[in-house]
Image (cartoon, rainbow, N blue to C red):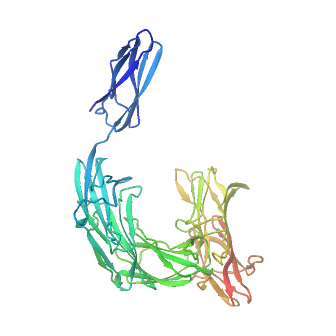
């Protein structure tokens, strides 16, 4: 409908003034169509000492784009010009959504939370007057409505979670969310002693590029009921999930279930032992008084999962059995966090995400040396145009779990032709997956670069790998075509058989397997050399590399009375890319 407003002009002079009126237009929502703003009359005479009015009309029926339309009403005459701003909002097709809330007794109630969302957008529906009804105006479209009811009594912990996965708003809509239709969730593990530790439930919009989703986390499911409101969504529009963790003094169980299109109206599953894969985990720590946190995060090809807050481990080193539901298309990523006595994070190690076989048993060791940078998965360096970005997991363990640690020094430098292009000092470094650094304005032509990382950490955090220095040299050019390519950084990983405190015996020989990660695996190794030091890197002795078909290794002969073993490595691939590394106190020795 056209909307008309009045503009009044006042003449303070002693003679009449004639003004010619015209409209200039702009607009955020696309070009303002001709005739959307009109002024009448086109010529206006304002009497001396008096006023005159002009009508300005905005007609939003014109045009095809929505949004804010703006313009200026220009009144010119008698050598002067008056400009008046104009604006109108052309609303996209919208409708009124009325939601009536009924609690578990069927009476009107104000929910603890009510949210309506669509990909990339969401808003709360607030029952400000407490009458159990909300009314809001929303653009035409498909939405998800999520409502949480919480009991109001001090000893009543009941909660009801209701979700409408496919709310189609094509006209004014009146709907009811009735908590009485919700049903309970009952999940049990094969071990009757297993007590719930975390319980999470949520939904996601797979077609959303920004990951529009909702997750609720509770201590258990005993007080929660859930239900669906209205119809299910078409394929690819909505996914729901629930899961959690359960523990005994020696075991941890993690399970998750997903569904697509619909939400849960109750859920019951009694997990059988044959549905689980078992991980027997040895969790190490080289410093005394450390504690831990073990978590497992699930994923599916269609849905990004959720892991909960994890199980606290009262002391490290320790052993624990982690059981994972291994049915359907679930994959899992297991993490071990090292914490101090106050449960403040000090280090984290992450196993690669993978699937497991139901009924199978796996053995894995977290948190024993040798700790050093590992190039694998998301850990490495990349070139995109004139930008180099690096994110290397600096304290990955001997088993290959990507890891980082609280450090006292974290320094990264990039040089080329004796010129420093980047130098960062993140000392001390607290915790994320890996220190991150970027260099910009790099030359497009092939150039030889040297990237150096230098990490140190206090012995209160770890008694091993107290300083790790790595230097990579490689040639790089702009990949062109907007491509982002991985840079040829390779690493050498030592995986000796050590105690859970990363110790070995002095006076005894030890064969240390080593593995290569990164482009050198495919390009081929031109040379590989290893040195060992028993005096924290003051003197070094060559340790010949055994290139047996079963795998590379070095055999070290630990002197009696030695306290530490440090390792130095030099690697070159067939393209001339090199890596030189020293690990001070790679592991310690005991009598």
Which residue is at 70% across, 55% downward?
420
On the rendered structure, is 424 left or right of 178? right
- Extreme residue toward the front, this view: 154
- The one nearer the camera, 253 or 248, is 248
- Extreme residue toward the top, this view: 15
Q: Residue 207, percent across and down?
A: 35, 56
Give the vertical position of 376 relative to 67 (above or below).
below
Total numbered labels? 0
Q: Residue 336, percent across and down?
A: 52, 75
- Extreme residue toward the right, this view: 539
Quarter in which the N terminus is drawn: top left
Q: Identify the image quadrant of residue 114.
A: bottom left
Q: Identify the image quadrant of residue 316.
A: bottom right
On the rendered structure, is 504 left or right of 81? right
Could you tell me if residue 417 is visible in this image?
no
On the rendered structure, is 427 left or right of 277? right
Could you tell me if residue 263 is visible in this image?
yes
Give the vertical position of 262 relative to 310 (above or below).
above
Q: Residue 75, percent across and down?
A: 41, 19
- The one nearer the camera, 542 or 323, is 323
- The one nearer the camera, 375 or 570, is 375
Q: Residue 16, percent across and down?
A: 40, 10
Q: Identify the image quadrant of residue 190.
A: bottom left
Give the vertical position of 501 relative to 87 (above or below).
below
Give the vertical position of 405 relative to 276 (above or below).
above
Quarter in which the C terminus is drawn: bottom right
């Amino acid at each position: 409908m056209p909307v008309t407003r009045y503009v009044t002009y006042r003449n303070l002079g002693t003679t009449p003034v004639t003004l010619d009126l015209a409209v200039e237009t702009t607009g955020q929502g696309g070009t303002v169509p001709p005739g959307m703003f009109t002024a009448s009359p086109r010529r206006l005479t304002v009497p001396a000492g008096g006023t005159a009015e002009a009508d300005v009309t905005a007609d939003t029926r014109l045009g095809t784009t929505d949004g804010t339309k703006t313009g200026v009403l220009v009144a010119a005459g008698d050598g002067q010009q008056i400009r008046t701003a104009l604006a109108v909002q052309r609303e996209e097709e919208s409708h009124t959504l009325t939601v009536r809330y009924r609690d578990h007794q069927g009476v009107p109630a104000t929910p603890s939370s009510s949210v309506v969302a669509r990909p990339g957008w969401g808003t709360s529906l607030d029952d400000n007057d407490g009458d159990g009804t909300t009314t809001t105006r929303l653009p035409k479209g498909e939405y998800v409505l999520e409502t949480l009811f919480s009991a109001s009594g001090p000893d009543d912990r009941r909660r009801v979670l209701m979700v409408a996965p496919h709310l189609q708003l094509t006209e004014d809509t009146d709907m009811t969310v009735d908590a009485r239709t919700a049903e309970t969730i009952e999940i049990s593990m094969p071990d009757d002693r297993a007590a719930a530790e975390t319980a999470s439930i949520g939904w996601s919009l797979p077609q959303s590029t920004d990951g529009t989703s909702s997750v609720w986390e509770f201590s258990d499911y005993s007080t929660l009921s859930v239900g669906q409101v209205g119809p299910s969504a078409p394929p690819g529009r909505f996914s729901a999930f629930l899961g959690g963790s359960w523990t005994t003094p020696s075991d941890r169980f993690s399970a998750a279930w997903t569904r697509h299109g619909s939400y849960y109206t109750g859920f019951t599953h009694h997990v059988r032992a044959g549905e689980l894969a078992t991980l027997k985990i040895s969790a190490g720590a080289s410093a005394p008084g450390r504690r831990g946190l073990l978590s497992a995060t699930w994923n599916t090809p269609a849905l990004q999962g959720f892991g909960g807050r994890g199980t606290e481990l009262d002391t490290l080193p320790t052993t624990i059995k982690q059981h994972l539901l291994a049915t359907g298309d679930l994959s899992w990523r297991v993490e071990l966090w090292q914490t101090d006595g106050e449960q403040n994070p000090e280090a984290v190690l992450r196993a690669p995400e993978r699937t497991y076989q139901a009924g199978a048993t796996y053995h894995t060791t977290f948190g024993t040396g040798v700790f050093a940078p590992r190039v694998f998965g998301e850990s490495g360096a990349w070139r995109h145009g004139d930008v180099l970005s690096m994110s290397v997991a600096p304290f990955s363990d001997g088993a290959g779990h990507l890891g980082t640690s609280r450090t006292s020094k974290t320094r990264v430098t990039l040089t080329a032709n004796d010129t420093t292009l980047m130098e960062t000092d993140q000392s001390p470094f607290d915790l994320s997956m890996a220190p991150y650094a970027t260099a910009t304005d790099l030359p497009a032509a092939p150039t030889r670069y040297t990237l150096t990382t230098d990490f140190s950490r206090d012995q209160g955090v770890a008694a091993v790998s107290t300083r790790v220095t790595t230097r990579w040299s490689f040639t790089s050019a702009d990949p062109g075509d907007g491509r982002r390519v991985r840079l040829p950084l390779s690493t050498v990983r030592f995986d000796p058989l050590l105690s859970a405190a990363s110790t070995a015996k002095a006076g005894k020989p030890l064969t240390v397997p080593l593995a290569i990660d990164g482009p050198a695996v495919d390009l081929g190794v031109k040379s590989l050399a290893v040195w060992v030091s028993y005096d924290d890197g003051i003197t070094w002795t060559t340790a010949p590399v055994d290139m047996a078909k079963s795998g590379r290794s070095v055999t070290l002969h630990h002197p009696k009375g030695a306290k530490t073993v440090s390792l130095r490595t030099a690697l070159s691939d067939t393209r001339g890319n090199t890596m030189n590394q020293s690990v001070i106190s790679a592991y310690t020795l005991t009598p």
